[in-house]
Amino acid sequence: MDELLTNFPLLCSIFAILFAQFIKIPIMFISTRKLEWSRFFSTGGMPSSHSSGVTALATSIGLVEGLGSPLFAVTVVFSVIVMYDAKGVRWHAGEQAIVINRLVRDFQKMTTEIKNWPKKNEEERRLELKELLGHRPSEVFFGALLGITLSVTLFFGLGLGK
């Protein structure tokens, strides 16, 4: 159990994920003037916690094991795949969710007019698909930069790089 609690790459990557999720709240507040604590538990947004976590993992493995280690190579490839997915596949899934939600709203509006439904809150009538799934390239880039920066800072700040 002590090994788990002193595993620098593990702790560093978990910290990077949590930190990236936390700073989404003030970033969202600055842009919308709304304080949304739920952003801590949601996907998407600036910065990418996926990118932050995997780059923190790869960077800390590189610092601890060396840049020539096979484990560093595995984590770099893993990081690239995760960041590609966060930017590509998940982003496009979010774009499709936007279109589907628009279709659902239009259909609901039509059926409301046809059937003369009593007025209801839109959230009560349906659960929207999650539209903020993936990341823009800038969100992936800054998430990766955050993960690398946190890993290097913690590694040398904790005196592990002697």
Image: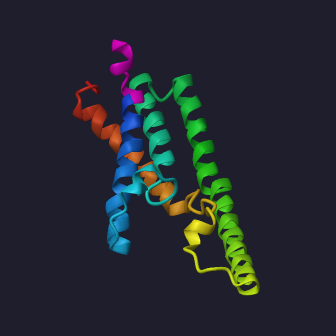
Image point 65% across, 56% down: which residue? 88
In percent of width and height, residue 90 lies at 64, 55
The residue range painted magenta reads 1-10
In percent of width and height, residue 4 lies at 39, 18
Membership of 8 in magenta stretch: yes
Position of residue 85 in the picture relative to residue 76 (left or right) = right
Q: Is residue 99 above or below residue 114?
A: above
In percent of width and height, residue 111 lies at 75, 80
Membership of 108 in magenta stretch: no
Secondary structure mostly seen in magenta is: helix
Picture colour scheme: rainbow
Image point 25% across, 24% down: which residue? 162
Image point 50% across, 47% down: which residue? 51
In percent of width and height, residue 42 lies at 48, 53
Q: Nearer the viewer, residue 67 or 148?
A: 148
Position of residue 99 in the picture relative to residue 128 (left or right) = right
Quadrant housing residue 132: bottom right
Image point 40% across, 36% down: which residue? 14
Quadrant housing residue 107: bottom right
Q: Is residue 96 above or below residue 16?
A: below
Q: Nearer the viewer, residue 124 or 10?
A: 124
Q: Report how many numbered discs are placed on residues in the image.
A: 0
Q: Quadrant of the N terminus?
A: top left
Q: Is residue 144 above or below residue 132?
A: above
Q: Nearer the viewer, residue 93 or 58?
A: 93
